[in-house]
Image (spheres, helix red, strand yellow):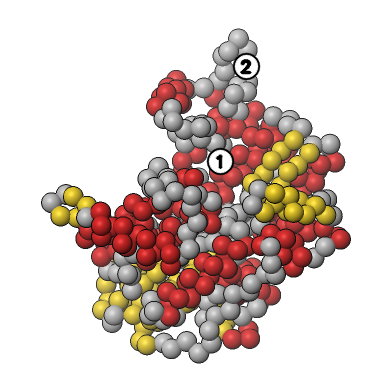
Amino acid sequence: MKWSSLRRAMLLLWDWPSSRKSLPAYLPNLTVAENIVLGQWPGRSGLTTPRAIHARAKAVCDRYGIHFDLDIEMRHLKLAERQLVEIVKALMRDAKMIVLDEPTAALNEQESAALFDILRRLNVQDVRIIYISHRMDEVYRFSDRVDVLRNGRLVASVPPKETTSAQLIAHMLGQEKEEFTRNAGVTQVGSPLRLRGWHSSGLPALRDVNIDVSAGEIVGLYGVRGSGADSIAEGLAGASRDITGEIVVDGEMRKLFASPYEARMAGLAYVPAERKRDGLVLGLPIRRNITLMVLRSLSRFGFVDSTAEAAISDDLVRRFDVRFREADQPVARLSGGNQQKVLLASRIAAQPRFLVLHEPTRGVDVGARVEIHRLLAGVADDGCATLLVTSDVEEAVTVPDRLIVIRDGRIAGELTGPAMTQANAISLATEG
């Protein structure tokens, strides 16, 4: 192992706050190979080499048919890639029991299928697997037994073949599933947000992307991972420097936003895909997270008007039905669904005219998912032009007023009305 990498790892561990209950799942400044073999260095007498580390990591990846750039630092990987690295780390340790918490939340269909294949092989090798998921299709594709927990109690334990998804959801919610339905007959007034001629030379490369979003409308943008949908979301947020093209705001043609700040000044709010890394300050209380985007308007001479802050926060907490034990508890202690509600509330606090949502229900339970969808419909009904970027095909065909499908950096088609089905969306997204 290189001394510079080892020194970085030592510094990261030394500086990690003592108040944290556990270490991070990975070390961002070490390579993929170094993270995979972390704690199980190849070599003798405590000595190892970069070549030995790379060989050991490559061997376990080849064994399970998972391939990475082993020499890249972890901090450069996207969430889905980091999740796969964590799975490889567990496989390398010859674990007799593996616990996976929402492992496919950021994986595409092909990656998820590869993971299921690996888990089936491990199961045959007498490895016990606890698989935590809110996705019904995964429950039926993979499980031998389903245990349903609600409010900390076991409320059902059945083989999948002896129950239905509706019954499982009823156990989860304590009631029958409430379906989200979008009000028909959306009134579109003008086209306040337009993307014109977007191109990029990166991976994936965007090619002549044009999208219009009207006031009061929810437009869905659906594609599998690597389709270019992620790049469009980040480009609208001012978080990408690789895209060329123009944005039309209220009829005025302008260049792409150069920074997130510039996007906010234009009235655009962005809900990132990774709430814990890019959207929330986990150590701060709920109230401060909700008002982060509007603190400047609540401050005078560097002091925050706590009364005004409380009024805004309390109103949004009620509106978004955020559940918590104590009003001043850190956001880190909330459930995933409530964290996502806080994230949405913080963006709505700024009263944006344009809202870009990037995987808004990733990693939340069935109940929170329906609540979030209803909240988004309410925001759109108030006149906000909303772009919903998602890789969840069920979400893609139930929430938007119309759906744009992207494949290989190009718009593959648009679906509206009865044509907005999962089969049609998947077909456009995957068939060249």
Give the label on residue 43, or none. Answer: 2
Between 167 and 234, the one lying in front of the other is 167
Give the label on residue 118, or none. Answer: none
Q: Left of 59 or right of it: where is 54?
A: left
On the image, numbered disc 1 is attached to which residue? 69
Image vertical order of residue 309 relative to residue 348, above or below: above
SS state under label 2? loop
Extreme-left residue of the structure: 301
Q: Left of 91 or right of it: where is 82?
A: left
How packed mark 2 is, by other alpha carbons closer than 10 Å (few <14, some 14-19, many 20 or more), is: few
Instruction: Report whether residue 237 is seen.
Output: no
Q: Position of residue 18 (x, y in %)?
A: 43, 27
Between 30 and 146, the one lying in front of the other is 146
Give the residue drawn at x 16%, y 49%: 302
Q: CA distance from mark 1 to mark 2?
A: 22 Å
- Amino acid carrying label 1: it is Asp
Give the residue drawn at x 52%, y 32%: 22
Mark 1 / mark 2, whichever is N-terminal: 2
